[in-house]
């Protein structure tokens, strides 16, 4: 078993365009405060058909290679987590391998379980390294998705698109994972799904929030028991406060606030052995709000500007947190919660690496956001109504990839 395994570097690729959620709210006749305060979003990335899941994934991996000057012959495994792949059989990982001209010696595959697929990909690579099977090689876990609920739906302001690529190795400069210390919770539920042949997800929105909260309770309790057993934390009034920060899966920013309140509720109710009554609730509400501001809010900057990117959403939160606070957090343990509808979830943890400030700087996240172009509701509507198989008219920016068309059922991609 290797001593240290985790995330060495991270890169984010986004569609070139975004919409302001205030503009969308006004066009839908909704009070903008519902989207900005009620759901917690500011902007939402909009993917054009040429910016498909494979193109976004390859663009993120290309950035990762460029940022780290990584020799592809060192990569033994490439796993893509996605729930919006481009083919029923062929893996997005194969398309990425082809676009990047990666060596044939690699193990490549996709993981699918709604938004949890990215964590399945990360675990696959991390456990391959931790077991020694990697034999000194590194691996890449990529999360890439386009979240579509459709025009004029209640899920519309919670869409988004993007990809996060993570270099996983025995030099976890960003985050050393507590391998083997996690809690999981899964159930067979219809909270969110996408029947075969549909581009848009079907969602029972309010029920999906309940499923998420039930899942975070089970996963967190499982993690807490193992973390106590391994002396990573100690018994206390609110054990979750020993985590310097917690990054949650963020389908919309307010969900992280609800999840954090639920984690604290688990701590308090498990200690007292009874549900919070009205007076305990009144005492807890301001405490939970203060704890959210410290432990969670610093991870939400990117999600508020990008929206939901399904598998990559948790890792966008991690990138956002380190971008904002890496210097404060080196050597500290943080928690992470991954949720995939259907459903499965996992609460896990890791320690921020001593070189995290430098490692996250090389991701250039301010530039990734600044390079985007704002579009209005009319253009956003036109894009969402385009057929999926429409290549982008304009060439991709330098280093990025775009879907270039399909001939004889074979998809091809162009590099800028
Ligand atoms: N000003 C401020 N806040 C407002 C507001 C206003 N004018 N109007 C409404 N709100 C608040 C509501 O109080 C609510 O907050 P709360 O949950 O803390 O009470 C929030 O905005 C959302 O309002 P709601 O009426 O519940 O929205 P909705 O019925 O349109 O649906 C979702 C919201 C999230 C269910 C919907 O967008 C959805 O289905 N999204 C996709 C699924 C998803 O992301 N699931 C998450 C788990 S995976």
Image (spheres, rainbow, N blue to C red):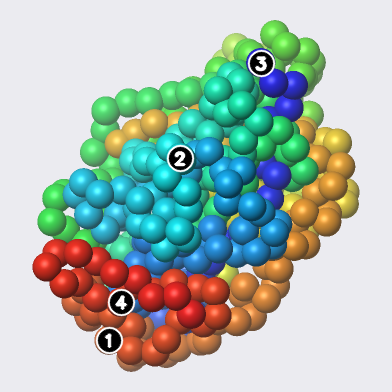
Q: Where is mark 1, residue-wise?
A: 382
Q: Residues within 10 Å of mark 3 (few under 14, many from 20)?
A: few
Q: Where is mark 3, residue-wise?
A: 1
Instruction: Say whether disc 3 or disc 4 marks the residue closer to the N-terminus.
Output: 3
Percent of width and height locating residue 4: 73, 27
Asked if residue 47 shows in the view, the reply is: no
Residue beneath the point at 24% across and 38% down: 190
Q: Where is mark 4, residue-wise?
A: 404
Pointer 1 and pointer 3: residues touching (CB < 8 Å)? no
- Residue 153 placement, left or right of 175: left
Disc 4 secondary structure class: strand
Instruction: Say whether disc 4 or disc 2 marks the residue closer to the N-terminus.
Output: 2
Residue beneath the point at 86% across and 36% down: 331
Q: As rendered, which of 164 and 373 lies closer to the eye? A: 164
Q: Residues within 10 Å of mark 1 (few under 14, many from 20)?
A: few
Residue beneath the point at 77% across and 54% down: 359
Q: Nearer the viewer, mark 2 or mark 3?
A: 2
State how far apart marks 4 and 1 are (Cα).
20 Å
Disc 3 secondary structure class: loop
Instruction: Say whether disc 2 or disc 1 marks the residue closer to the N-terminus.
Output: 2
Q: Nearer the viewer, mark 4 or mark 2?
A: 2
């Amino acid at each position: 078993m290797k001593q240290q395994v985790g995330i060495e570097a991270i890169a984010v690729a986004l569609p070139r365009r975004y919409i302001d959620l205030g503009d969308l709210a006004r066009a839908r006749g909704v009070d903008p405060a519902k989207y900005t305060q009620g759901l917690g979003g500011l902007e939402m990335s909009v993917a054009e058909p040429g910016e498909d899941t494979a193109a976004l994934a390859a663009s993120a991996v290309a950035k990762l290679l460029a940022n780290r000057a990584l020799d592809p012959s060192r990569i033994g495994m490439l796993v893509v987590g996605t729930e919006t792949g481009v083919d029923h059989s062929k893996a997005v990982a194969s398309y990425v391998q082809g676009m990047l001209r990666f060596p044939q010696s690699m193990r490549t595959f996709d993981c699918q379980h709604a938004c949890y697929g990215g964590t399945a990909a990360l675990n696959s690579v991390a456990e391959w390294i931790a077991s020694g099977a990697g034999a000194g090689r590194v691996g890449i876990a990529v999360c890439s998705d386009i979240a579509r609920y459709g025009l004029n739906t209640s899920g519309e302001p919670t869409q988004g698109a993007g990809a996060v690529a993570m270099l996983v190795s025995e030099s976890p400069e960003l985050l050393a994972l507590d391998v083997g210390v996690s809690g999981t919770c899964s159930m067979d539920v219809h909270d969110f799904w996408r029947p075969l042949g549909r581009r848009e997800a079907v969602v029972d929105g309010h029920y999906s929030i309940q499923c998420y909260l039930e899942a975070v309770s089970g996963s967190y309790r499982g993690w807490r028991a193992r973390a106590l057993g391994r002396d990573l934390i100690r018994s206390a009034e609110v054990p979750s406060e020993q985590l310097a920060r917690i990054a949650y899966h963020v389908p919309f920013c307010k969900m992280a606030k609800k999840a954090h309140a639920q984690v604290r509720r688990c701590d308090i109710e498990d200690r007292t052995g009874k549900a919070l009554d009205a007076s305990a609730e009144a005492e807890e509400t301001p405490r939970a709000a203060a704890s959210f501001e410290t432990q969670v809010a610093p991870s939400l900057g990117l999600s508020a500007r990008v929206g939901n990117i399904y598998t990559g959403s948790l890792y966008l939160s991690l990138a956002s947190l380190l971008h904002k606070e890496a210097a404060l957090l080196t050597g500290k343990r943080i928690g992470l919660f991954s949720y995939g509808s259907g459903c499965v979830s996992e609460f896990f943890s890791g320690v921020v690496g001593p070189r995290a400030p430098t490692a996250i700087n090389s991701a250039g996240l301010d530039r990734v956001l600044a390079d985007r172009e704002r579009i209005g509701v009319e253009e956003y509507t036109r894009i969402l109504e385009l057929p999926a198989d429409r290549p982008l008219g304009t060439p991709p920016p330098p280093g990025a990839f775009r879907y270039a068309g399909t001939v004889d059922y074979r998809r091809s991609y162009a590099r800028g």
